[in-house]
Image (spheres, rainbow, N blue to C red):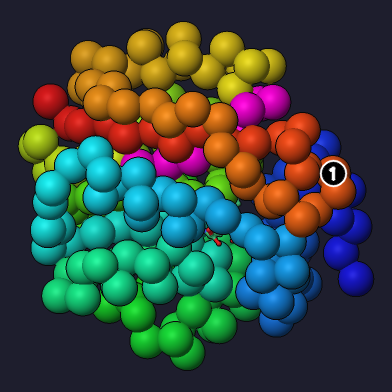
Amino acid sequence: MNNFKSLVSGVGSINKTRKYYDNWSEKYDATLKLWNYQAPKKSIKFLQKTINISPQKILDLACGTGLFGTELKKIYPKSQIFGSDISKKSLKITSGKKIYKKLQIKNFEQLHHYKLKFDLISLIGSMTYCKNFDKLFANINKNIKEKGFVIFTHRTDLWKQQDFLRILKKHQKTLKIIKISRPLNYLPLNNDFKNKIKIKIVLLQKY
Ligand SMILES: C[S@@+](CC[C@H](N)C(=O)[O-])C[C@H]1O[C@@H](n2cnc3c(N)ncnc32)[C@H](O)[C@@H]1O
């Protein structure tokens, strides 16, 4: 059984995080349903309200068991969605859902090597685990098309601690800030998060 307290305080090293999500993988979807996880649906709504696009190629970083991919597929049924994550067991579950064209086991701070460039790159519910923002943004910059979009969520408590707007502004030369949402519910039925920890959704565009 996972120690869900570490969801708030952080799991630790990448190996610990991988193990944590491997162990949780089979029950992840059910647990998040119980907590009324809202990031995937809210991110899609935010995207649809803010811009009118029909992305052909999408890369879903830290795709986990594919909860955001599921929502993407509903609004962009013709898109080709690629996914990556460090948890092999989560990806096994994702693969069974047959949403993604290709899945790979990969750390989002390492450069991903695709022959194509993406119209949209997402990172939903996972910025918490980023240890080096420069490396993550380098990976995104390498794989995004010119004028392509990036959507991600970030926890409001970490946003404040990390002075995250400053980090975004540092990357403005390549990734322009299009819109940042107000704080929104994240895991409203989880006692540690409830009204205390929310998320902001961020939309960026490659120059
Ligand atoms: C809260 S889950 C979110 C999964 C999915 N995006 C969703 O919305 O359900 C966090 C995911 O981040 C993955 N993860 C954590 N650190 C990572 C890293 N450095 N690179 C890639 N994936 C990572 C975990 O394995 C896990 O699947």
Q: Is residue 58 above or below residue 195?
A: below
Q: Nearer the viewer, residue 165 or 35?
A: 35
Picture quadrant where residue 103 is located: bottom left
Can residue 16 be seen at all in this image of the molecule? no
- Residue at x-position 77% and y-position 33%: 196
User: Where in the figure is residue 122, as x and y percent of width and height?
Assistant: 36, 49
In this rendering, position of residue 13 left or right of residue 45: right
- Residue at x-position 29% and y-position 40%: 150
For mark 1, what is the residue? 192
Q: Nearer the viewer, residue 93 or 192?
A: 192
- Residue at x-position 67% and y-position 70%: 33
**Range of magenta residues:** 151-158
The amino acid marked with disc number 1 is Asp
In this rendering, position of residue 83 left or right of residue 75: right
- Does the numbered disc 1 mark a residue whose Cβ is under 8 Å from ligand 1? no
Quarter of the image with the C terminus is: top left
